[in-house]
Amino acid sequence: MIILRAINGFFQILIYLILGRAILSWFVRPGDRLYPAYLLLVQVTEPMLGPCRKLLARFGLASGVDFSPIVAFLLLSIANRILISILSPILLGGNL
């Protein structure tokens, strides 16, 4: 179904944006040619990564290495599966 594919595609795009941000953060510095693209990725992904960072800090797992992208990947994957499992029976005409 088109709606289910769109939902999967949306979550895949979010994951790719987070991955792109993580990779660019290793290489791009202020003044670089790709810095504006990096800032755009930060603006788009920070609403997902900020709460993950706070969650890690709450459990004392905040360190020099930012593991929030990994937590975000996990949470986005879980949210995608839950949403698809809820919508699949409804959209495909099955009984709940």
Image (tube, rainbow, N blue to C red):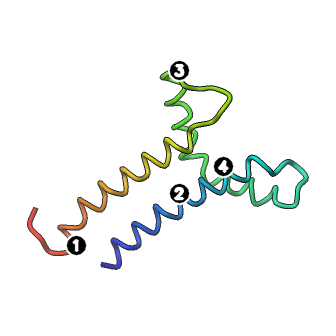
Disc 1 secondary structure class: helix
Q: Can you identify the residue that label 1 sits on?
A: 91
Relative to residue 51, is residue 95 depicted above or below?
below
Point 38% across, 73% down: residue = 5
- Which residue is at the far left? 95
Residue type, numbered disc 3: Gly
Q: Closer to the camera: disc 1 or disc 4?
A: 4
Point 71% across, 57% down: residue = 40
User: Which numbered disc flags the more N-terminal residue, 1 or 4?
Assistant: 4
Disc 3 secondary structure class: loop
Q: CA distance from mark 1 to mark 3?
A: 42 Å
**Screen quadrant of the C terminus:** bottom left
- The x and y percentages for residue 64 are 68, 28
Q: Closer to the camera: disc 1 or disc 3?
A: 3
Tell me: 12 left or right of 92.
Answer: right
Q: CA distance from mark 1 to mark 2?
A: 25 Å
User: Which numbered disc flags the more N-terminal residue, 3 or 2?
Assistant: 2
Disc 2 secondary structure class: helix
Instruction: Kindly indicate the quadrant of the structure image that contains residue 93.
Output: bottom left
Point out which mark residue 22 bears: 4
- The x and y percentages for residue 62 are 59, 26
User: Which numbered disc flags the more N-terminal residue, 2 or 4?
Assistant: 2
**Screen quadrant of the N terminus:** bottom left
Q: Can you identify the residue that label 3 sits on?
A: 60
User: Which numbered disc flags the more N-terminal residue, 3 or 4?
Assistant: 4
Residue type, numbered disc 1: Leu
Circles 1 and 2: CB atoms closer than 8 Å: no
Circles 2 and 4: CB atoms closer than 8 Å: no
Circles 1 and 3: CB atoms closer than 8 Å: no
